[in-house]
Image (cartoon, coloured by chain):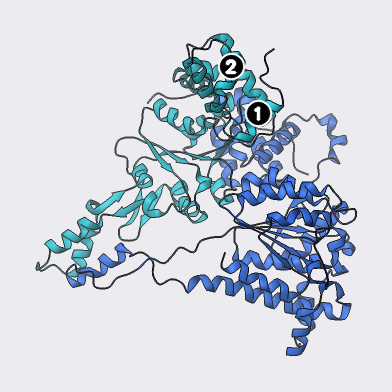
Amino acid sequence: MKKQAFETKSITESIVAFSQFARSHGLNVGIQETQDALQSVSGALLTNAALFKNALKTIFCASPEDRRLFDRLFVLFWETNPTDLVVRKNKTTVQGAVEKKANPSIVMLGRGKTDEDAEAGKNVSGANETERLKTTDFSKIGEIDADPLETIARKLFKEMAVRLRRRRKETRRNGPINLRRTIRRSLSYGGEPIDLFRKAHRPKKQRLIVLLDVSGSMDKYSFYLLRFVCALREHFRQLEAFVFSTSLIRISKLLQPNRLELVLTTISRQADNWSGGTKIGACLETFAEQYGKQTLNGSPIVLILSDGLDTGDPNLVGEALFKIQKRAKKVIWLNPLKGMKGYEPLAGGMQAALPWIDVFQSAHNLESLLELENILSDA
Amino acid sequence: MQAFEHPDVIIQALAERNYVADEELATALFLLLKLQKPLLLEGPPGVGKTETALVLSELLDTELIRLQCYEGLDVNAAVYEWNYQKQLLSIKLQEGSDRSIQEKEKHIFNHDYLLKRPLLQSITAETKSPVLLIDELDRSDEEFEAYLLELLSAFQVSIPEMGTLKATHKPYVVLTSNRTRELSDALKRRCLYHWIDYPDLAKEMAIVKKRLPDIEPQLLEQVVAFVQKFRLLKLSKMPGVSETIDWAESLMALGYREVNDRAFEQTLGSILKSAEDIRQVRSEGIGAFS
């Protein structure tokens, strides 16, 4: 428990304590910020409470969310009386931290193993075995195959990410002339630009937005799809990822290969995401409205991974997707069900979405996911 | 330069220059001057972020150097570029001279051949600190943002051919962003931060009044009240304060002393900038004068 204002003896000590307090509650306050705060609060800023608060706010915050949090913390720290202490003690818990002990049993396929375990498991799988697993539907994978499949998946996804990157590098031949280097070299030829240097084409950073359905019906697929999204991130550094079922959660920042387990636990803690129906329309709508301005610019590619089984109003799916499609370069919908023989996109939501989709593909096994590489590489 | 000992002094001084600032913004500016740290202003379009930098330069009676960001903005356009034509000529002129190549090279990569772009300009100011406005930073690429880090923390620019140029007078830096993408934490950490939101009714009226001193009180009140109402709707393009001023100005130009049906119809285009928004406002029945 960090100190509160009333426990400190001097203003300097209070400010340092407040910095620590703010840091422990999720504000990104470092030594530099503390220093700035100490340096700036003198004279007028010390005698006026509102000014004092504003000054600290300007220094400590970095986003509107931070500012809201700051307002709460400020009151908590500076205006708490010793007498409130007993009640308050239990209320302040550290925000945003994820407890490890959260039950991972609802995590897809119950696969709560660490990476080492999987690696140490089965590295050996013959060519035939690999081929078989590549075409096996994720939903039909038994416990025995799960480990080798994951190993293969990780390897293949990694290769894909590397290929996507390399493809960019090789097309660096015919850029505009690099005057700076050319002139520098021409010095030795008395000013004749004999060796021409060219500027490399700046690889165009295509932005990718992924919306992953994690509802009950997608359960068997989501784990692999999430891993796939992680692999894509290797290439698309500006990747934004969201998961949705009945509500939408942004997971872009959580998405790191070695933290997959954490993502899964975090998501699964929001229990309603795993049971209950899917509200694709409402979630897409939320996405367009809340994150649209921030993420749908510079015409990104939007990748939706969902089975299209919707319990909400199907018209809403169409409307929302229309809005998204207008601002995206391409909308790609990957549907695991499409891999089934005789599947027709008849489900209400899927039906309504079709007019606004540029690419409609299956995503039921590794092979189908790897096909996406071709679609993305010429994007 | 006048010393600003208190944020209130800044509010006062800004008001004299037709800019209405609240206490929070004034404090942010106060700290910008005092700590000499860059200030990052975020907020929806049209709430006066850019204007803040303009008025700050007036206030300090110093030069404003502006860099408008866009996708693909690179070092050549933002920091410096070599004057290639001049370099070529110089090489030609030196043909036959007995200077060594190293000497020639040193000669053509010196200050005389350097074209200064805004960022370099801002740190080479000769007499006093200028105000550097880096506008709509969210539009630039991440690479450029990373490049800015050196400038914003150390106020210096590295040029491979010449070495590092340090600022003679640290510029006052104001960065603005519309939040179309999240800026990096590294950048944010080097800046003070302030969020400018849409003003409330009283403040907006004060702003419009400052800009258009001749406006009829009734017109002023009506216009601002309408705009405030528009902002409660889910419009695709929210009207900013600058649009409010435009609207009021159009109404005045057309000779209206109050908003009525006809005036509303005629001028709606200067406040709402999309067909859907206009349709929505009509269907909500705002602006029906009966």
> For mark 1, does the 10 Å Cα neighbourhood hold few (<14), some (14 to 19), or many (20 or more) residues?
some
Dividing the picture into quadrants, the one containing residue A310 is bottom right
Residue with the mark numbered 2: B262
Residue with the mark numbered 1: B231
Q: Chain of mark 2?
A: B
Please state the horizontal and vertical placement of residue A177, each as a whole percent of the image: 33, 65
- Asked if residue B142 shows in the view, the reply is yes
Q: Residue at x 78, y 84 (%)?
A: A132
Q: Which image quarter is the C terminus of chain B in?
A: top right
Q: Nearer the viewer, residue A96 or A231?
A: A231
Instruction: Residue type at mark 2: give it.
Output: Arg
How far apart are the alpha carbons under marks 1 and 2?
22 Å
Q: Nearer the viewer, residue A333 or B232?
A: A333
Measured along the vertical axis of the image, is residue A194 above or below residue B219?
below
Where disc 1 sits, the SS reads: helix
Q: Are the residues at dot 1 and dot 2 in contact (C-beta closer than 8 Å)?
A: no
For the colour blue, the matching chain is A
**In the image: residue B27, left or right of residue A98:** left
Q: Chain of mark 1?
A: B
- Asked if residue A282 shows in the view, the reply is no
Which label was assigned to residue A320?
none
- For chain B, give the colour: cyan
Where disc 2 sits, the SS reads: helix
Please state the horizontal and vertical placement of residue B74, each as a whole percent of the image: 42, 54
Viewer-side label of 1, 2? 2
Q: Nearer the viewer, residue B171 or B202?
A: B202
Instruction: Residue type at mark 1: give it.
Output: Arg
Total marks in image = 2
Q: Is tag 1's residue or tag 2's residue first in the polypeptide sequence?
A: 1
